């Protein structure tokens, strides 16, 4: 059975950083919010945002395409082109996430002799 961990929120970050650094929570919140605002501003202007050892946020343009409504597949639905933000993990994050993938795969892989006998 998989135990679901709660999502990390901006509030969680503020509390954790404030507790670790001794900086007042409101000041930490202001710094985090400004950081996010600058990221959004840069992306909205079409610029990539590169954070070393974390990853790269990049704006890509998705082509227009034809989709189908699953409830009424006989009708085509035009989907216009649009800008989307893509994220590519940095080397350090990728290594840590892959470690999680390997641990999960190990938990799911049955060992010899552990299955039901016939």
Image (tube, rainbow, N blue to C red):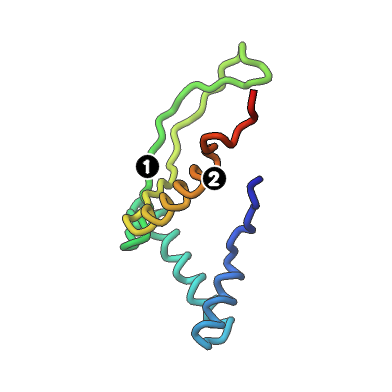
Compared across the picture, whether 87 is left or right of 116 comes to left
Q: Where is 41 relative to 89, above or below?
A: below
| Labels 2 & 1 near each other (Cβ < 8 A) | no
Residue 86 is situated, as x and y percent measured from the top left of the image, at: 41, 46
Mark drawn on residue 60: 1
* Element at label 2: helix
Compare residues 12 and 75 and report the one nearer the observer: 12
Mark 2 crowdedness (10 Å alpha carbons): few <14, some 14-19, many ≥20: few
Residue 9 is situated, as x and y percent measured from the top left of the image, at: 59, 64
Q: Quadrant of the N terminus?
A: top right
Residue 69 is situated, as x and y percent measured from the top left of the image, at: 62, 21
Compare residues 11 and 36 and report the one nearer the observer: 11
Residue 13 is situated, as x and y percent measured from the top left of the image, at: 55, 71
Q: Where is 104 relative to 40, above or below?
A: above
Disc 2 designates what residue? 107
Residue at (65, 52) in percent of width and height: 3
């Amino acid at each position: 059975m998989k135990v679901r961990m709660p999502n990390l929120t901006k509030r969680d970050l503020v509390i954790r950083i404030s507790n670790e650094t001794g900086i007042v929570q409101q000041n930490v919140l202001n710094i985090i919010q400004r950081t996010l605002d600058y990221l959004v501003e840069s992306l909205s202007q079409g610029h990539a945002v590169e954070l070393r050892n974390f990853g790269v946020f990049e704006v890509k343009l998705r082509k227009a395409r034809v989709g189908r409504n699953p409830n009424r597949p006989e009708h085509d639905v035009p989907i216009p082109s649009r800008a989307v933000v893509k994220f590519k993990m940095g080397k350090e994050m990728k290594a840590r996430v892959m470690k999680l993938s390997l641990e999960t795969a190990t938990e799911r892989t049955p060992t010899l002799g552990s299955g039901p006998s016939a």
